[in-house]
Image (cartoon, rainbow, N blue to C red):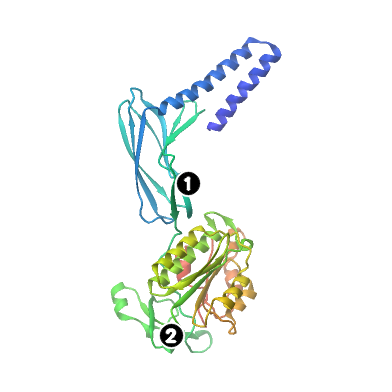
Amino acid sequence: MRMKNRSLLIAIISLSLILGLATGFHVFYSLFLISSAICILSIIWAYFNTWGLNIEYHREYSDLRVGNSIRTQISLHNKTIFPKLNLSVTDLYELSYNPAEILLNIPAHKKEDITLTVLLEQRGVFSVRGAMVKSIDPLDLSHISRGSRLPRELIVFPKVLDIPPFSMPYGEITGEGASERTDPLGSTSISTIREYQPGDSTRNIHWPSTARTGKIMLKQFDSGKENILWIMLDMDSSVHSGTAPYNTEEFSIIAAASIAHAYFKIGWAVGLICHGNQSYVIHPQQDKQVLDQIMIALATIGSEGKTTISALFAYWEGSLSVKSDNLVVITPNRDPYFINLLESPSNNATPLALVIVESDSFNESWDKQNTVRHTAQGNLPIYSISKDDDIKSSLSHPYQRPN
């Protein structure tokens, strides 16, 4: 609105001056002088409307993570004998697509206390400033802002969802035909406890956890593998699509952060490999500092890389992996060649799951059932996430369980 009003006023000033010089009519000179005076007075009004205004604020920082909020308590004290009219107070516009804003008037010698809550909608490293007060003249022509100019750096971490660890795709195979399932009793030690999923055998019910939670909980066995997990995140720019915050990049980041947190919570060593606008190779460790490094990497990484998921897998397999490592791959790429490569018994990976963020789901003509049916051909559990899905539910229930 301000830009339209200002543009209109500038057009009137310019046109009246041109017509006055061209025709010599006093009416055009009068229009030029009046419109110029209005423009100057609007600037003076906006400036003096913030004069004598004292601004103090206090922020409550807790868990700086997408989906959480920051609350700011702002105190405005008008120390003059004139009221302060049409003030706009904003805070942390750098962190949100919809920054918190409030319009108010402050009487002479009065103090106003307000609280603004900003929802964190973007991950990353941000340089933020204090609460800003903007004075708006009555015609909405001039805006003058006041507030802290000293920046402070904040890291906003990606959203983390509370999901269960993935089911192990190894162990002894029991049963025949369509009823075949991985039997975790082929191993001797329990790795973790997870919630029952349709098709699971009830012979592995963990009764103490079932009684405590009120849900059917199953014992998950480790099949002799070490509790080491690599998360491979595809940040190849050619396979990502959508516009933030609803794009394959953000959904992949949420999936990676949630999986890392889920496995760290049960005592696994977790690592990350991804090549985007920056390259990260974080070796798995059961260490809170390593988990923090992963979260920082996920807060700053962008899908601007040129390394395909097949090339990234080949590099990891040849240089970083050992036979006891487990792997989760997160990618928007449904390339059959890579899926076959991942499932091949000749490679050095022990794939726990493939998480596919469906890039086509951002197209209105997308058919989810056909995508899953054409993709899920082997024994690797595949978790599919589309634009309109609940990500937590999608990461909790695979479309294909091991046969």
Q: Going by the picture, which residue comes out furthest to the right?
A: 22
- Which badge, 1 or 2, comes first in the chain's sequence? 1
Note whether residue 221 is visible.
Answer: yes
Percent position of residue 233, x then y: 54, 67
Question: Would residue 16 be found to the left or right of residue 67 on screen?
Answer: right
**What amino acid type is highlighted by mark number 2?**
Pro
Percent position of residue 289, x then y: 41, 66
User: In terms of secondary structure, where does tag 1 sit?
Assistant: helix
Locate residue 244: give its quadrant. Answer: bottom right
**What amino acid type is highlighted by mark number 1?**
Glu
| Crowding near the residue tagged with mark 2, few <14, some 14–19, many ≥20 C-alpha atoms within 10 Å | many
* Measured Cα–Cα span from mark 1 to mark 2: 49 Å
Percent position of residue 387, x then y: 53, 60
Residue at label 2?
Answer: 184
Note whether residue 122 is visible.
Answer: no
Locate residue 266: give its quadrant. Answer: bottom left
Above or below for 351 versus 386 = below
Above or below for 194 versus 294 = below
Which of these two is toward me, 150 or 380?
150
Residue at label 1?
Answer: 94
Q: Residue at x 36, y 25 (%)?
A: 83
Percent position of residue 108, x then y: 32, 25
User: In terms of secondary structure, where does tag 2 sit?
Assistant: helix
- Callouts 1 and 2 close, C-beta under 8 Å: no
Q: Residue at x 52, y 63 (%)?
A: 252
